Image (cartoon, rainbow, N blue to C red):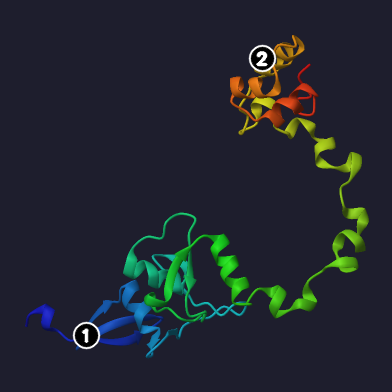
Amino acid sequence: MNPKNIKWKSEKYGRFMVEKHGCRLRRQTDEQRFWLKVKKTDMCWLWKGYLTRKNGYGKISFNKKDQVAHRVSWQLKNGDIPTGMSVLHKCDNPPCVNPDHLFLGTQRDNVLDMVRKKRHWAFVKPESAATGERHSSRTYPERVARGDRHGLRKHPEAVRRGENSGTAKLTEEKVKEIRSLYKTGHYTHVVLGNMFKISNQNICKIINFQRWAHVK
């Protein structure tokens, strides 16, 4: 008999799901196990396996890792999920694994989608929002690190200033040059801004030691 024509029957063998034909057994693939846990309806494809208590999403061990069911469904149809992207539901039904009901988005898209559909905890449990006098900064003011207890005061060496900042456009030498040129009286904020490719406002703050104050 041609192996391709064999009709395998899914059965539970010990703690594994296997495929059986007569006395022959073979282990099911992860993809086969996945679709056995899906109940397809006209709209949503509902996950029949384990659901998380917190938000009702399906979970499954896939490729030797615990994964969320709807993410696996999207991967089976579309391939790998780009780094940093989330898989969101169009149908707003957490157990649904219908790939046509799923789309990619950033974490920001995910939160905005949740707020738009009023599934955010602030809508679901507004009484849980600690606002006003119930905020922790009001109920436990001693826990707020202010003044000399603030991290910037206790560990100033940990703060990236000047050239060490990842967004710095100037060096200490250029800052000294800006101040020296301005003192001559021949250069305005606008001219210096164009020379050093920064805004006039930044030039003003550098000259008045509001920026790069550590450079004398």
Query: Can you give x and y, in whole percent of width and height, for residue 101 in the image?
Result: 42, 77
Q: How many marks?
A: 2
Q: What residue type is labelled 2?
A: Glu
Tell which circle, 1 or 2, labels the residue nearer the N-terminal end. Answer: 1
Category of crowding for the residue at label 2, using alpha-carbon neighbours closer than 10 angstroms: few (below 14), some (14–19), many (at least 20): few
Work out whether residue 97 can be spotted: yes
- The residue pinned by badge 1 equals 8
Quarter that holds the C terminus: top right
Q: In this view, does 24 lie above or below 130?
A: below
Q: Which of 113 and 127 is in front in this view?
A: 113
Residue at image point 63% right, 23% down: 170
Picture quadrant of residue 161: top right
Q: In this view, does 33 lie to the left or right of 160?
A: left
Q: In the image, is residue 73 above or below residue 189?
A: below
Please tell me in which quadrant of the rendered image residue 17 appears.
Answer: bottom left
Q: Left of 112 or right of it: where is 83?
A: left
Q: Which mark is residue 173?
A: 2
Q: Which amino acid does label 1 sit on?
A: Trp
68 to 38, vertically: above or below: above
Identify the residue at image location x=12%, y=78%: 4
In the picture provided, is 72 more to the left or to the right than 143? left
Task: Work out how far the residue at label 1 is from the one at label 2, CA to CA, in angstroms.
Answer: 76 Å
Which image quarter is the N terminus in?
bottom left
Q: Please identify, in this view, whether the residue under mark 1 or under mark 2 is nearer the observer.
A: 2
Q: Position of residue 179 (x, y in %)?
A: 74, 16
Residue 161 seen in the figure:
no
> Which residue: 88% across, 54% down?
143
Which quadrant would residue 75 be assigned to in this image?
Answer: bottom left
Residue displayed at 61% across by 80% down? 53
Between residues 54 and 196, which one lies in front from this camera angle? 196
**Which percent across, then down, holds residue 34?**
37, 77
